[in-house]
Structures are given as C-alpha cells and as structure tokens.
Image (cartoon, coloured by chain):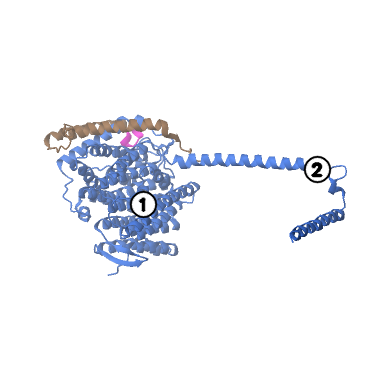
Chain colours: A blue, B brown
Amino acid sequence: MIEIPPGWIIIAGAVLIPILRGHLRHLALLGLPSLALALIWTMPTETLWQIPFLNYQLTLLEFSAVGKVFATVFALMTLVGGIFAMRTASTLELSAAFLYAGSAIGITTCGDLITLFIYWELMALGSTAVVLAPGTASAYRASIRYLLMHAFGGCILLTGIVWHLYSTGSSEFTQLELQGPAQWLIMIGFLVNVGAPPFSAWIADAYPEASPSGAVFLSAFTTKTAVFTLLVAFPGTGILIPIGCFMIFYGIIYALLENDARRILAYSIVNQVGFMVTGIGIGTEMALNGAAAHAFAHIVYKALLLMSAGAVLYQTGKRRCTELGGLYQSMPLTTICGTIGALAISSFPYTSGFISKSMISSSAAYEHLTWVWFLLAAASAGVFLHAGIKYPWFVFFQKDSGLRPADPPKNMQLAMVLFAFVCIALGVFPQPLYEMLPYPVEYEPYTADHLVTQFQLLLFAGLAFFVLLPMMKRTETISLDLDWFYRKLLPRWYRAIEGLAGTVYDACQRFVTTKLTTLLQRTYDREEHRPKGYFARLWPTETMVLWVVILLASYLMISYVQAGGR
Amino acid sequence: MNDSEKHWLVRASTIKILWLVFIAILIVTVVSELFIHKHEYFGIDGSFGFSAWYGFITCVAMVVAAKLLGTFLKRKDDYYDD
C-alpha cells in the first residue's frame, strides 16, 4: 500500500494539467481526485509518516476520523468540480484549483502546525489564482484584496504558531488550550479564513468575481478547512458561539439586501459556516459531529447552488437578479438542480441539510443554551428566506426577463445532477455519513416531532417571503460592509495625505527657487553681464594670487603658533 | 402578453391554485401537531404552533431589519468602481 499524503496527488495534478491536452487532461481531472479518494478511504486512522525538522517532528501524514470526513468531501468536490469546469475553465484556473484543493486536503491529513502553515499558504496562493483566472480588471483587483486579506491572516497565524512552538516546545496539531496570546493568535488566524467578524467581507468581495466554475471551487475549501482546524484545535471554546451566531445573521441580512445572485450565495456561505462555528463552540460530541456533518453537506449543496448560478452566468453573461428571471422555461434541469440545492441549504426534510444542521440545533437544546437555540431556530427560517426561496425565486422564476438560454453544456449538467443526487441521497440515507463522523451518533433526525416543527418553521418562513414580496423588490445596489474601510476610507486617507505632501513639497520648492532667483538677481550686474562684488571685477589670476597669499599667510601663522610654545 | 399565451405556471389561474394548495399545506402542518408528541426544552417552544408563528414572525423581523439597515448601507452597485 502506497502511503503518500492524498493531497500531494492533487497537487501533482496542478503541475500535470498545464502540460496535458485533450483526453489526457480530462483523464487527469477525473483520475487524480478518484485516486486521492481511494487513498483516503483505504488508509488507517493513525500516524503514518513523520520526518524530523530542526527540533520538531513534521507529521506529513496522520489520519483522524474528522480529517477523513473533510478529506473525503474535499476530494469529492475536486472530482465533481473538475467535471463542471473541464470544458470551460482556463488552464490557469484548473491548475490553481488543483493546487488549492490539494493543499486543503493536505491540511486535513497533517499532524503538526508547521506543515499546516505551509499548506495554509499554498491554499492562499492557489485560491488567489482561481479568483484571478478570468483575467478581467475587476477580478484582478478582487484577487489582490483577497491575497492581502489572506496574507494578513497568515501572518497572524504564523506569529501564533511560532510563539506556541517557542513557549510549549510542541508542534503537534491537536486540541489547544487558550492559555495565552500564542493560542489566541492561532485562533484568530483560523477565524480570518472562516469569515468571522470583522473579516467577513472578503468572501462576498472575491468569490463572485471568479469564473462560473472558479466560484464553485472557492466556495468549498478555504472556509471549510478553517472550520476543520477550529474543530480540531478549539472545540468547546465558548467565544465561538456568539461569533458563529453573528456570522449566521450577518449572512442572512446581507443576502437579503443583495442583488447579485452569486453574492447572495457568497453571503450565505458566511451564514452556513456560522452554524458550524456555533456547533464547534457548543463543543459537545453531538455538536462537533453536527459541525463536521454540516460542513460535508454544505460543501455539496453550496457547490450545487454555485454551479446552477454559474450555469446561468455562463449561458447569459448575467448575474444580477434585476436582469434575470423566468429562466425555468428554458433551463429546466438547472432550475431543478438549483432548487434542490436551495432546499438542502434550507434543511428541508429528506435533504442533506436537514440531517446535519438539526444535530447542531438539537445539541443547543440538550445543553439548555436557551438564547442560542432560539437564534438558531430563527436562523433556520432565515436561511429558507434568503437562500432557499430568494435565490431560486429571483433567478429562475419571478418576472419574465425574456431571456431564453438553454441548459449549460453536458459536463456542467452531469456535475449538477451528481451533486443534486448526493444532496437527496444523504437526506434520505444519512447513516453512511453518520458512520464517518468522529463520535458515535445516537441521533434520529426523522422523528414526527422534528418533521412537523421543521415543516412549520420553513413553510411559514415561505409564507413570510411571499407576503413581504413587495418589500423584497430588487434594487441595483450593493451594501456597505467593513471592507469599506480598506476599499474607500484608507484610499481616501492615502489620497488626502498624498495631496497634502504634494502641496507642502510644491510650496517648499517655490520658496527655495524664488529665494535663490532673487538672490542671484540682486547680485548680478546686468549692464556689465557679470556678478556684482569685488571679486567679480578682478581677473581670475588676480583672485588666484589673493587666495595664495591668504593661504601662505595662514601657514605662516599656524607654524608660528605651533613653534611659539618652545 | 395574453394570459393564455403565458407559460402555464405563471397564469393567474395557476397562481391562485398554488396559493390555495400552499395555504392548505400550512394548515395541515399546524393541525398535524395535535397528533404528535412534541419535545419541549424551554417551555414556550412546546406551545401549540410555536414553530409556525416563530418562523413567520422572525422572518418578518429579519426582512424589516434588513430593510432598515439597507437605508444606511445600500449604495449604487458601481460605488467601488473608479
């Protein structure tokens, strides 16, 4: 049995894809993720490969149960994302996506913080290139903002890791106690990637600028690897509960205000990841199981949703709700798949979201976390509102836009059907997923109680949507977020400071030149065409003689003074 | 466009039927609560039709909150374009 990290196989794909063409490239796109998936499933859950590095052990390959859940869904995502992207994505995008996916899988199978950090940065580079890949000016600017944000998060993480290594002497990536600034910095580094406040804006800023297929890859890896690292290192950390709840409602409110279909979905990533962060904060076995299961389910249905939005963008070139509508008539398959994704994200019974998210809210109930439970219940209704109905309604239904695009190419259709199938299969048969989870599952999602209350919650949320439809009318607007500070305020300050410095410089220059000019003019004799003054009237030889006399006289004086003492 | 030329799904008659079906389903989900045993963790969540009214009211609250915040936060979508 070969024992190499499965992520390396995908990263090798990043090198192979640019040099392969045609069927060979398609083979690599499908074969390498399948091979990685096979490896993930045949490896035992233990430490398999360690090498010494300076004073530390680098654990290049270590499998845990929770790592396996994330590695599986990441590899699956790479495979189906590759099918979706294979005919339309640029070479740069495919290669970058494989580097990105491979390093994400690497994080799930590594056992020390140094290796984790290397993968973390590789992921930032790969994902930046995915954002950059369309080559438009807006994609370029978004990718640079994205890179700066992740470089910032990476610096915080690195500082934390180095501090942690120095103070504890251990590089092991395992549960960490929040005992000092080192561990706090590590957690903040993870939280930047998870999209926690005040760093939530980068998701909706960068992802929608990527290509139709690029956004599908982006939705899966960065935030969910951060969920994985939080789940391993900081389970049961109380502060994560309010952070998660904030993210949940931030996502809902901003998605409700948004007009761009793919930005709606980007905001709802923050919302969904908020549920996972809350689960990690609650920290019971059931809540952690719920967070892992929800990450698995979420990657699939969010990719499906972004595939349907990507298909619409690819076929029409449009992504604003105000320009879309009525597409169900000519894109039936995309409509059905998008709607299945929308139902799954809303935790509709018999979809994947129901069997995973209900574990998180039930664990809040079991722990008697009153306000958390009430917030989660309201949020479940809110998800149906902002993603479950709003997205399909404004893209595929509402008023007829007159657009009649066909369903997308066959490979995109296949990818959507595959993931729509997974969404329903997981909802109807949750056992295979439950058996993968890190702790034993004694949870039955399909009780009459759960079903009735969930149907009431969702359907009355639906009623609220249609009753309030006039208030939901789309406007051609964006909503200000904390990225305003670095996209507007700082550039404004920079320009002000730049302007001030320019004014001061100009004033100094004017002052010096006028002073010099008047000085020269005052000392210049225009009639004689020479400077005024005694020396200007002499021949240069005469001046020279005068200076020689002064010099010799000085010599005489100095030697006289030196000899004077004796 | 004449109503009969429209796609069958968006004809006024279909929409009326859809609303009636939707309302019927809403009633069924609430009434069916009479026939099940509900777990109650916090008191109020055990009251009759809790999820129904809680889902409706919180959604209205979220839409209104978004609308209010929108008056401060919304900008034209070319706001950041230089």
Where in the figure is residue A143, as x and y percent of width and height? 45, 50
| Quadrant in which the N terminus of chain B is drawn | top left
Based on the displayed image, in which of its 4 quarters is residue B18 positioned? Answer: top left
What chain is tagged by disc 2?
A: A
What secondary structure predominates along the stretch shown in magenta?
Answer: helix
Residue A460 in the image, given as x and y percentages of width and height: 25, 33
Instruction: Using the image, determine if residue B10 lies above or below residue A10.
Output: above
Looking at the rendered structure, which numbered label has been put on residue A523?
2
Res A103 visible: yes
- What amino acid is at disc 2? Thr
In the rendered view, tell whether residue A470 sits above or below residue A81. above
Q: Between residues A247 and A321, which one lies in front from this camera angle?
A: A247
Residue pointed to by mark 1: A222
Q: Which residues are magenta?
A: B4-10
List x then y, in percent, for residue B49.
Answer: 18, 32
In this rendering, the count of numbered labels is 2
Viewer-side label of 2, 1: 2
Q: Tell me the amino acid under the disc marked 1.
A: Thr
CA distance for labels 2 and 1: 72 Å
Return the disc, 2 or 1, that comes first in the chain's sequence: 1
